[in-house]
Image (tube, helix red, strand yellow):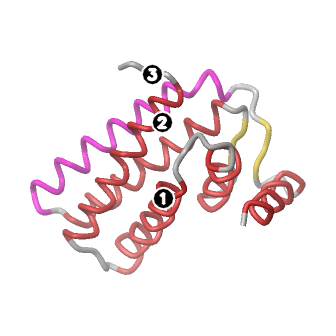
Amino acid sequence: MANKINLEFQKALERKRILPFSNGKKLVEKEIKQAEDDLIEAKDRIKNEKFKYATINAYYSMFHTARGLIYSKGYREKSHYYLLVAIQTLFVENGLLEEELVKDFHTAMVLREDADYHGNFSKEGADSVIDSATRLLQMTKVILKITK
């Protein structure tokens, strides 16, 4: 699987779906702050039984966390899918991030799309995405050596 993802990353670079991004490192903290804010909002929404928006906010916490990661490596993505490809290649294949968190990110992506576009959402789904977002954010702070 690693070779397939690596090949996919290379093709994404060639097709300009993942791009070098020299300003990325300057924006890492901003992305992590946005991830934290989205996670706080998701937790608030689930307390108020707003499961659709809890799911959406928790997903966007993961999105901004993942962006912070790839920005730290000097890249940016052109779609949510290619963000997933970049995380897999730059962090999982290098042993910096657990494969399970990338699978959770993909699941969160599907749950967010279902909630946002199809009106399919649940407390269980929202709880799952919030848990995954929390773990990804915690691991990212360790990887990026963010102490806040």
Mark earlier in primary sequence (1, 2): 1
Identify residue for label 3: 146
Q: Amino acid at mark 3?
A: Ile
Query: Which quarter of the figure has residue 40?
Result: top left
In the image, 18 versus 96, the foreground residue is: 96
Mark earlier in primary sequence (3, 1): 1
Point out the stretch of residues depicted in magenta.
Answer: 24-49
CA gap, disc 3 and disc 2: 8 Å
Q: Quadrant of the C terminus?
A: top left
Which SS class for mark 1?
Answer: helix
Q: Could you say where residue 11 lies in the image, as x and y percent from the top left?
A: 86, 60
Residue at left 69%, top 42%? 76
Q: Relative to 123, does residue 74 appear above or below in the rendering?
A: above
Residue at left 64%, top 24%? 25
Which SS class for mark 3?
Answer: loop
Identify residue for label 1: 100
Q: Could you say where residue 110 lies in the image, as x and y percent from the top left?
A: 46, 71
Mark earlier in primary sequence (3, 2): 2
Q: Could you say where residue 119 lies in the image, as x and y percent from the top left?
A: 31, 78
Do the residues under discs 3 and 2 have CB atoms within 8 angstroms?
yes
Report if residue 118 lies within the magenta region: no
Identify residue for label 2: 140
CA gap, disc 1 and disc 2: 14 Å
Q: Residues within 10 Å of mark 3 (few under 14, many from 20)?
A: few
